[in-house]
Amino acid sequence: MIDNFLSTPIEDSGGYESQLSDLGLRWEYLEQTLRMSEQARRASKTKDDAKNAPGSQDYFTRVRELRYTLRTELQWEPYDPLQAPLIVNPDKTVGIGVLLGDARTGLPGRPHPRSKRPAGVTKERAVARNQDLQLPFEEPEFASPAMGQEELDEYSQMETWYLLTSRHEARRTGVVTVRSELSLPDHVGKGGKIDRYQRRILLPDIEFEKVNHYAVETTGDHQVSVEER
């Protein structure tokens, strides 16, 4: 693993550290998540693993590590609307999920990155709420709450951000670069993919050593070469 990383130009003024601070976050929390997910991907690429295991373990680890870190460091709480996992701040004004982006992820300017897969109903609702929260406030006329409405109202002022990631492996050197951004989507476009954001906090690139084809597994006093990738 290469510990030094390159800073990506920022989309908004103020630098990524101050922008994250505005949300009550620090880069090190997100960096830890991305490093752990890459480690999980590599550990799941043995000849006995299913072909989709690396990508699946990468996703599961991003979800788990992001939620664990923010829960233990900042007392944020997990929230799972229709199995679309988020981690939410104590005020329930900011929620964060994970999302796989395309090659534009982490790069400034337009076009904005698109999600690799269709957003699905839950994310589309979150994007719609992000749009509504930008409209001028009007005092609603509340009637008696309908059954099941209590939980919805509890999160009614929550913006939903996503930690977008995109992974690139250099053909010549084999070095892996993970680009990322923490962004607030406001549009679902063609094919149901998120393709526009109100805000984009572009984060530093992280570089990792090339993926080796064999690892050394220690068994007792012996070292055995194990095909890993």
Image (cartoon, rainbow, N blue to C red):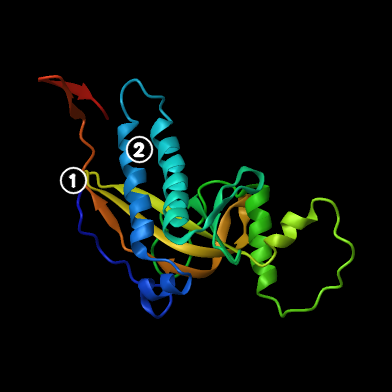
Give coordinates of residue 183: x percent, y percent: 49, 64
| Residue pictured at 42% horizontal, 72% vertical | 21
Name the disc covering residue 146, or none: none
Residue 114 spot, x, y in % from top left: 51, 56
**Left or right placement of residue 18 versus residue 169 in this view:** right
The local secondary structure at tag 1 comes to loop
Q: Are marks 2 and 1 in contact (CB under 8 Å)?
A: no
Residue at 54% over, 66% down: 197
Q: Quadrant of residue 140?
A: bottom right
Q: Report the front residue among 138 and 71.
A: 71
| Front-most of residues 87 and 53 | 87
Name the residue: 65% across, 48% down: 81
Q: Is residue 229 left or right of residue 166?
A: left
Neighbours of disc 2 within 10 Å: few (<14), some (14-19), many (20+)? many
Eyeballing the image, is 14 above or below 210? below
Q: Residue at x 21, y 47 (%)?
A: 1
For the residues marked 2 and 1, what is the alpha-carbon distance in whole angstroms?
19 Å
Left or right, 25 with reference to 139: left
- Judge by depth and name the residue closer to the eye, 21 or 59: 21
Answer yes or no: is residue 67 visible: yes
Q: Secondary structure at mark 2?
A: helix
The residue type indicated by label 2 comes to Arg
Amino acid type of the residue tagged 1 in the rendering? Thr
Q: Nearer the viewer, mark 2 or mark 1?
A: 2
Q: For the C terminus, which image quadrant?
A: top left
Residue 102 visible (yes or no): no
Q: Position of residue 27 (x, y in %)?
A: 35, 64
Is 90 positioned to the left or the right of 137 in the image?
A: left
On the image, the x and y values in percent for residue 203 come to 36, 64
Which residue position is annotated with label 1?
A: 173
User: To which residue does mark 2 refer?
Assistant: 41
Going from the N terminus, do you reach mark 2 or mark 1 first? 2
